[in-house]
Amino acid sequence: MNDRGGARVAAEDILFFNGLADAVDKVYDLLHHDARMLLPSPCYPTHSSNEGKRGEYESVQFKLDPRNGWLPDPDEIRFIVKYNPAIAGIGLIHPDNPSGMVYPEEILREIVEIARQYDLFVVADEIYAHICYNGAKTIHLSQVIGDVPGMALRGISKEYPWPGARCGWIEFLNKERDPEFARYAQSILDTKMMEVCSTTLPQMSVPRVFADARYPEHLARRAAEFERRSNETFAAFEGVDEVIVNKTYGAFYFPVVFKDGVLTGEQTLPIANEKVRALVEEMVRGVANDKRFVYYLMGAEGICVTPLSGFHSSLDGFRMTSLEPDDARRARTLSKITSAIRRYTTA
């Protein structure tokens, strides 16, 4: 990490957890009750749900815009921070889940500058940091944060990949530059010290795997595969008039957004199995429009995607993954989804 340049860490700045979700829980649980984290929208629920559970507050979020390549507007972030003095930190998922967007360096630096100006810290969930493609490059928070306090959240679940290892960690950046942040970081350590130690076997593997001469080739090969699948998915949806899609540049997800007014809350898909149809009709009562589509897609085609409304977002849409390794099966699935969209929106 120190070889990259930027903020430097020592061994005592790295704290392991039983998976990154465990780390995320601590980051939010140990904030002051009245402090807020500014998060993106859409936002991966492990972050937004942890922020939401701490008090009866409206979420404070900045928008990722699908009409602008899912990029945020730094001026919006600055405005929100300026008029919300309870905000203590800015949270990013980089590369982003669910959008697949990779923050350009200039936007990351602008967000860091906002944090510096308003005495905030920055948290970057970098679990997908080494899955970048389509010309995007990995830029770690440590490379742009300067002297602003922050945390980079890392792990091996997506990178090796070894999700069952439950091995994630926090890299504390510039933790001694601000006394309040230093106390906050210490509280995370103190809480962790009251638990049984985090899984040690995967920790022992990290130096060997990361230092292996074959590892960069492994990462490049995976990134190239996800690039190919992402671009195939983009091509499949590009001609669907009812939706907005963008190329993705990181992680292994693909979001599809319905254009305004396309979903009415009354559309259906024919479901041959009567029991399944009755179950779906029961489940769609009172749900968000995109969730309604997701249930009908599952009932009619046996395909499961995730509604964007489940990512603390007002956008109607869904997220699918690029994990299916069988090219033919993936092509059939894409064909079924695009056909279902056309039939559903003209019903």
Image (cartoon, rainbow, N blue to C red):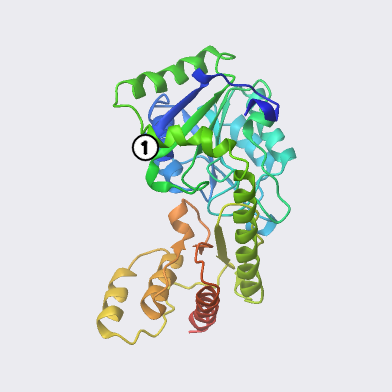
Callout 1 crowding tier (Cα within 10 Å): few <14, some 14–19, many ≥20 = few
Instruction: Please say if 72 is above or below 33.
Output: below
Residue 44, horizontal then vertical, whole percent: 48, 48
Q: Residue at x 57, y 52 (%)?
A: 251
What type is the residue that disc 1 sits on? Glu
To which quarter of the image does residue 2 belong? top right
Q: Nearer the viewer, residue 9 or 173?
A: 9
Name the residue carrying label 1.
56
Extreme-bottom residue of the structure: 272
Residue 237, horizontal then vertical, whole percent: 61, 72
Q: Residue at x 42, y 63 (%)?
A: 288
Q: Quadrant of the N terminus?
A: top right
To which quarter of the image does residue 287 belong? bottom left
Q: Nearer the viewer, residue 237 or 277?
A: 237
Residue 335, horizontal then vertical, whole percent: 54, 79
Extreme-left residue of the structure: 275
Q: Residue at x 71, y 50 (%)?
A: 136
Instruction: Please say if 256 is above or below 312.
Output: below
